[in-house]
């Protein structure tokens, strides 16, 4: 795009469809809100379909909705605030560190407030009784999936995590009503993760998701949804606090499973420690 995002929208206005005009008008009136919205939120506020939002972003020269938000943020935010809204140019090392730590603590606090304890217990029971557990995620969410696999293995629960997308899709097709699936996605709009969950759901598997908002395709497909809070920045899905919130939800699940039958899982913990002890100096 040679011109900025807002200018492109203004120039396109005379040639837009009715739905596209509604989108453009809402964006131009609330650009600072749009950069922190997902597709579903903007569609609801503009009273159009999610597909219309995606078509609109491509109409003005963007690759898609995420690319559009990045370009819009560059129009309206100072460069340093595009990385983190609490940081300002001129902050010293101590101020930057304090602000980032404070943001992470606030995200964890907000995540805890949204955590449904009954849902946590139900998920623990489902995971304990599952014949097979598969965890899906891509990008940064894959790192969380691998961490969950590691922690569950320590208490004797085997979880399958594939890095390859095709392997994820194939493993979802093999699930049954005796199995469980966990899908991790900040946006809740990741096409591959949604495809895996949809297939798992069709096969009768119990489906759990960890997302940032309920009004997303992934959340709507899930039997149980856990919401991870986030700090408002255009790099939300890459932020440390977002990842910490997702990891902490996993810790809550694993910790509760371990204490449901402490004797059994403590024995598994000791065995796993013994197994890796020879690998440490």
Image (spheres, grey):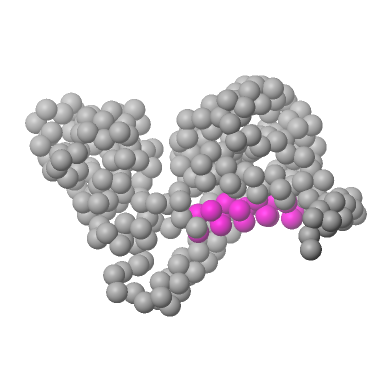
Residue lying furthest front in this view? Answer: 281
Residue 281 location (% of width, % of height): 79, 63
* Residue at 46% in and 55% down: 239
Q: Main secondary structure of the magenta part?
A: helix
Is the N terminus in the top left, top right, bottom left or bottom right quadrant? top left
- For the point 51% across and 42% down, which residue is it? 139
- Vertical order, 240 against 3 (above or below): below
**For residue 193, what is the image quadrant?**
top right
Of 36 and 155, nearer the camera is: 155
Asked if residue 65 lies in the magenta stretch, the reply is: no
Residue at 67% over, 47% down: 148
Observer able to see residue 273:
no
Q: Is 96 positioned to the left or the right of 247 in the image?
A: left
Q: In the image, 8: left or right of 275?
A: left
- Give percent across and percent down for residue 253: 70, 50
Q: Quadrant of residue 93?
A: bottom left
Camera-nearest residue between 24 and 12 = 12
Residue at 18% x, 26% y is: 17
Whether 128 is drawn above or below 178: the answer is: below
Task: Examine the rendering and report whether any part of residue 236 can be seen.
Answer: yes
Is residue 242 on the magenta stretch?
yes
Residue 21 pos. (x, y %) = 18, 33
Residue 41: x percent and y percent? 37, 42
Q: Is residue 43 left or right of residue 16?
A: right
Q: Specify the segment rendered in magenta.
A: 241-256
């Amino acid at each position: 795009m040679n011109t900025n995002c807002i200018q492109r929208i203004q120039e396109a206005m005379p040639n837009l469809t009715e739905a596209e005009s509604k989108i453009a008008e809402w964006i131009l009136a609330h650009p600072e809100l749009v950069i922190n919205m997902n597709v579903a939120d903007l569609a609801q506020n503009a009273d159009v379909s999610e597909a219309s939002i995606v078509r609109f972003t491509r109409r003005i020269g963007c690759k898609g909705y995420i690319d559009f938000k990045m370009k819009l943020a560059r129009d309206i935010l100072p460069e340093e605030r595009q990385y983190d809204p609490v940081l300002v140019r001129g902050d010293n090392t101590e101020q930057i560190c304090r602000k980032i730590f404070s943001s992470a603590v606030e995200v964890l606090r907000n995540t805890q407030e949204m955590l449904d304890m009954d849902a946590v217990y139900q998920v623990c029971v489902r995971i304990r009784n599952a014949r097979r557990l598969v965890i899906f995620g891509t990008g940064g969410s894959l790192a969380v999936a691998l961490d969950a696999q590691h922690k569950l293995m320590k208490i004797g629960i085997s979880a399958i995590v594939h890095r390859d997308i095709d392997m994820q899709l194939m493993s979802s097709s093999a699930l049954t009503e005796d199995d469980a699936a966990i899908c991790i996605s900040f946006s809740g709009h990741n096409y591959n993760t949604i495809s895996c969950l949809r297939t798992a759901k069709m096969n009768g598997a119990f489906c759990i998701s960890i997302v940032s908002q309920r009004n997303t395709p992934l959340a709507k497909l899930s039997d149980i949804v856990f919401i991870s809070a986030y700090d408002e920045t255009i790099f939300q899905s890459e932020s440390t606090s977002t990842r910490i919130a997702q990891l902490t939800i996993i810790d809550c699940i694993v910790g509760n499973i371990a204490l449901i039958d402490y004797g059994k899982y403590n024995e598994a913990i000791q065995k796993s420690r013994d197994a890796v002890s020879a690998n440490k100096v």
